[in-house]
Structure formats: structure tokens, C-alpha cells
Amino acid sequence: MGIKLRHEIISTDVLIIGGGTAGCYAALTLCKNSKLKVVIAEKANIKRSGCLAAGVNAINAYIVEGRTPEDYVDYAIKDANGIVRKDLLLSVAKRFNEVTAQMEKLGLVILKDTDGNYVTRGNRNIKINGENFKPILAKAVRKGKNIEVFNNVNITDFMVNDNTIYGAIGFSIREEIAYEFRAKAVIVSTGGAAGLYKPNNPGTSRHKMWYPPFNTGAGYAMGIKAGAEMTSFEMRFIALRCKDTIAPTGTIAQGVQAKQINSLGEVYENNYGITTSERVYGTVKENQLGKGPCYLQTSAMDKVKEKDLLKAYLNMAPSQTLKWIESGKLPSEQDVEITGTEPYIVGGHTASGYWVNTNRETTIHGLYAGGDVTGGCPQKYVSGALAEGEIAALDIISKISEFAEIKENVAKESRKIVKEYEDILKSANALFTAEELEEAMQKVMDEYAGGISTNYQFNEKQLMLAEEKIDNLIQLSKNLSASDMHELMFVYELRERLLVCKSVIAHLYHRKETRWHSFNENLDYPQQRDEYFCYVNSKFENDKLKIIYRDIVKEAVYEHKN
Amino acid sequence: MSIKINQEKCVGCLSCILVCPGSLIKEKDGKAYIKYPKDCWGCASCVKECKVCAIDYYLGADIGGNGSKLNVSYEGDILHWNITKGDGSVLVIDVNSKDSNQY
Ligand SMILES: Cc1cc2nc3c(=O)[nH]c(=O)nc-3n(C[C@H](O)[C@H](O)[C@H](O)COP(=O)(O)OP(=O)(O)OC[C@H]3O[C@@H](n4cnc5c(N)ncnc54)[C@H](O)[C@@H]3O)c2cc1C
Ligand code: SF4
Ligand code: SF4
């Protein structure tokens, strides 16, 4: 074809990659507390992009009356079996309530009792109308004086020199334009990664998954390529979700207090434990024992509650309400079947992502990370993503004078990447499409790296095979072609996923124990081992992933060291 | 999982194109169409954006779809979620955007 891209250069103080929850809140914080020029580069449109597109149901992380941030940290430590960063958890937990109050000021509806207090759901949640959470956030960003938003711009590479960031590069998916953003500091907030493993509904509904299929792990991949240190990719997140629609279950489990039961009607959750991973594991086990399918027992609920439940789902996962109506059997008439999802990599639920200091600076100078892309801080959810956006933004404001000025010899590096885009657009008749390689990748991960079809289990031999096959697919992905800018994005999304897969496999391999059932169920090492009470980190060096074992951080404030 | 855009009803305002988190909807001859139906996440953002009810949301047969279609119309703060079942009967669930979820 031979498309010549227009090469635009945009200079700013702070570049935010990914205008989702964390990215938008970081922009608002910068705007409120400084005069810095801010640019958001977002692959879709900030109005509904990312995790919040359909809406959320509750603020999952909140310090309710009578509890403290320290209680929250203790809970998260226990749930992750110790492999967390206490400093990171405490810093978000201290901000949960304040960022929530800010969202309420912007227009978020939060349920209150007659005395005006928030109504809590369990020990850590409050109830909201989260259908328009993202539009509310996006509206505030659009009003921000020094914020410029580039929608439909897909970022693919950081520009890094001497381990210091000076910008990033990407392309418009609508116009034939390559964008080079030059900035003093960069926040990456592109969310986690879905679509690595064969999904629950692999056919025409392949994207009916829980985590957004458009969060492809771009931020992880850019960081890996640039040599940033990453942590805990082996702590995969497997969610327990409503069968078929893969809609969240917390609303039923916590809102209606429905128990997990097997097909014999037995409550099985107490037999396996109640941490996040144990709940998934128990469900897998019951199925293996021939006691499936498993359900959330809703059939005892009353009709009034049921009406509210249908509405609650419309506010976050309309497919589930439609499913109930479609089937002719409402939840009071039929228990809700549940299933484990394919494994995702998502730092808002588990601990995978960038290795950061307490202020969310990564190991690349001037590069910060917030939200699901950031590691070490599980169970932070939507309020934690807001909080991390704020923490990163405030640190940037305090240090902006220290960050390197834009260097002049950067043009060469960016021209090389633009040429790569043009080459992909130019090359014709590639044998495979990105879609075909994606299917191949998902099959490999499913069968050899602990996907749904192997009950999330694997052994070392399988992981070695997985690595070999993913390496092969990485080679094949170098020959892909694209006939327009959207297809160019497909090519990069696949490459990002492949690199994340490679990293996940290496991490699974190097944690030679089973620390979390299902999340890393290593059949060669089915027990937890004391010597693995540590973080498994990695860093890409000379085209190889180097594994670094790090001691559990005990300090209140963590700074990077070698 | 996907959506269908009724070409007769579409007035070409292009808001659905703007809002889809996967940029799956494109424009052709002044009307919107979904270019990558298999890539639809089912978030319903486009459905909520369409002010003329031209977008129908449905479940694929592989996940239990039985012919029902869902779209949204507005009256002030109220969202009417209109569900037309396979047999033609219609059910409307009203959600007030100023009310919180009870769960
Ligand atoms: C379905 C669902 C329901 C949830 N429900 C709840 C709930 O009820 N309560 C709760 O507390 N938490 C909930 N969560 C968790 C919470 O929503 C997330 O943890 C949080 O929103 C993550 O924020 P983020 O900024 O990291 O990612 P996102 O908000 O997803 O933002 C990432 C952004 O980056 C963009 N992007 C990705 N790649 C690129 C690229 N290459 N270039 C440019 N832009 C890019 C994406 O388009 C997106 O806008 C839910 C999550 C999901 C998926
Ligand atoms: S929002 Fe509705 S009317 Fe507007 S372009 Fe989309 S389908 Fe057509
Ligand atoms: S339902 Fe969501 S993902 Fe599907 S086309 Fe509409 S906006 Fe896009």
C-alpha cells in the first residue's frame, strides 16, 4: 500500500498515556495543583474508555466507619499471602475516602442512609450509582485548563535515553498521523492485560470477558521493552464470574449475601478457604469432583430485592440483566451459575505490574505508573486507581524541576519507530493475520501455561513448551501487515500481548511453589515454600528476561536501589 | 455478543463512534455500522449514547441469547431500558441515574 504518515511532534510538561481511571485523575490533580501543561494520549475516547465503560457497582476499597487504613492493608496482605508492598497499600488506603469524596463533588451518586452516612456493603465497600462514573470523570478533565486530550491515539513505545524518559510515540487510529510526544515526566496508566489466554467464550462472543479486551497490556509491554523492572506477573488474576456473561458476582455475593453452592446444594466455600484465589480454586475443585455446576444461591431472595438487583446490573453489566430476562428465570427462581474466567494480568486486583517506589515512580527515571498497570498493590480497585493517579501527579509536581529537559537528538529514535509503522502498512500479503496469531497465542497459554482447559494448573515442562511456542509466535508477529490504521493497532496489540505472555511464563516458572491456588498452581511444587516469601521481579536486558528475587519490603517508604 | 445498528433509524450523529471503548463502530455514507462485531465487549456505551434508539444490543446464541434486544431511551434523569423479547413482547426497566444501586 505505502502509506506515508504525517509525523507530528507535541511538547508538554507531563504526558499521561491512557486516559482511564488513574490517568484522568492524575490529570485533574496536576491541573488543580500546578500550572503544568498536561497531555493525555488515549487509544479510544476518554468519555467511556477502559474498565469503567459499562459502569461499576460499588467503591470496592473504602475505609468504613470503625475501620482504619491499616485494617485494609492487613486484609490485602492476608489475601495475597504476604506478597504485597505494604508501603503502597497504606498510601492508597489513606486516600480512598478523600478521592471518593472528590468524585461525589464531581457528581457521583453515593447511597446514604437517613442520617446522611454512606451505606456500606460489607467491611470495605460503599454503594454507588457507577453507571456514569467515567463520563463524570471525563467531563471534569475536558474542563481542565491546561489539559489537552488526544483521543484515538494508540501509544506503542516510550522514548528513553540513559534510563530517563523523555516522551512516547504512537499513532492515530483514525488518521494517517504518527505522534511523537515529548515530555519532562510521563505517567503510564494503560490498565492491565486481557486476552492472553483462550477466553471463556472463544467464538463469536470472544470479547464477552470481564476485563476490557481493549486493555492489551500496552503499558507493561512498553515498560518491558524499555528495561523497566516488573513484579509479580505470576500472580495472575482469575475472577469468579456469572457464567456466559462473565459479569461481576460481588453484587450478588455481598449485596444479597448469596453463598457459593455446588449442584448438590452444598455450601462448599468453607472447605477451601475464602481468599480471592481460594474461592476460585474451590469452584474448580467441586467441578473436578463431579459436583458442578456451581452457583451463587440467589433463589431465596425476595422479589423486591430482585428488582433492585436487575437495576444494579444494568448500571454495570447490562448483559446479565438481559440474560435473566432472556432465560425467563429471574435470580429468585434460579441460582446464578458461576465460573472461573481466563487468567488476566491486572495490578488493581492482584499484584502484577511495574515495580515502583512509594511515590509510584518506576525504575525508569521520570516514568510513573498508576492503576492496574502498577504492581505490588492489589485490591486497590477503582478508588486505588484514582489514589495512585493522585500520588504520581503530586510527586511529579514536587520534582518537575529535576526532570531532564527535552533532548534534541531524539528525532532518530522516533523516526525509526515511525518507519516501523510505515513498513507494517506497506507490507502486503503476509501469510498470517494478527487475529490468527492471537488465536494461536491463546491456545498455547491455555494448554501449557495454566488456562481454563487445564484447570489453571501447569508444570515446568509445559511452561518450557509454552515459552518456545510464544517465542516462535513473536518471530511470526514481525511479519504482520496492516491495511489501515486500525489494523496497525491490532498488530501492536498482539505484539504487546505476546511480550506479556513471555513475561508471565517466566514468572510462573521462577516461583517454584504454589503460593496461591489457581493463580499460580504449579504441579511440580504444589506446596508453599518459605524461600519464596519474596517478590519475583524481572527486567528485559539484552533481549532476555532477567529474573530478580527481592526481599519483602518492610520500610514505610521505599526508594529504588540496585 | 454484539450490537446491531438499524440503518433506517440512524441519523448519523456519530456519537456511538466516538464513545466505543474499542473504536469498533465506523462511519459509511453518513451512517454508523459496526465493523468488528466479534470484538464487541458488550459494555452498552454506544447503546446509551444513541438518542434515537438505533442500536440494539443482544446476546450471542453461544452465551444464551434467545432473540431479545435491548436499547435505551431517556426522560430527564430516567433511563428506560427497553427489552424487546423474541416473541415481540416488551419489558421496560426504569433506572433513575440520581439513585444509587441498592447493592
Ligand atoms: C468490568 C469491571 C468492573 C469493575 N467493577 C468495579 C467495582 O464495582 N468497584 C471497584 O472499586 N472497582 C471495580 N473494577 C476495577 C476498577 O474499575 C479498575 O481497577 C480501575 O478502573 C482501573 O483503572 P486504570 O486507570 O488502571 O485502567 P482503565 O480505567 O482501564 O484505563 C486504561 C486506559 O488506557 C487506555 N489505553 C490502553 N492501552 C493504550 C495505549 N496503547 N495507548 C493509549 N491508551 C491506551 C485504555 O483505553 C483505557 O482508557 C472493575 C473493573 C472491571 C473491568
Ligand atoms: S448514535 Fe445512533 S444515530 Fe448516532 S450515529 Fe450512532 S447509531 Fe446513528
Ligand atoms: S457495546 Fe461497547 S464494545 Fe460493543 S460496540 Fe457498543 S460501545 Fe463498542
Image: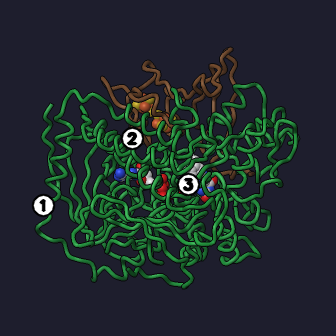
Chain colours: A green, B brown
Name the element at disc 1.
helix
What residue does disc 1 label? A411
Cα distance in 3D space between marks 3 and 2: 32 Å
Which three-letter amino acid code belongs to the residue tagged 2? Leu
Q: Are labels 3 and 2 assigned to the same chain?
A: no
Local packing at callout 3 (Cα closer than 10 Å; few below 14, some 14-19, many 20+) is many
What residue does disc 2 label? B18
Which three-letter amino acid code belongs to the residue tagged 3? Arg
Residue A236 bears which disc, if any? 3
Q: Could you say where residue A524 lies in the image, as x and y percent from the top left?
A: 60, 54
Name the element at disc 2.
helix
**Can residue A519 be seen here?**
no
Image height of B22 relative to A540, above or below: above
- How many dots with numbers? 3
Local packing at callout 1 (Cα closer than 10 Å; few below 14, some 14-19, many 20+) is few
Q: Nearer the viewer, mark 3 or mark 2?
A: 3
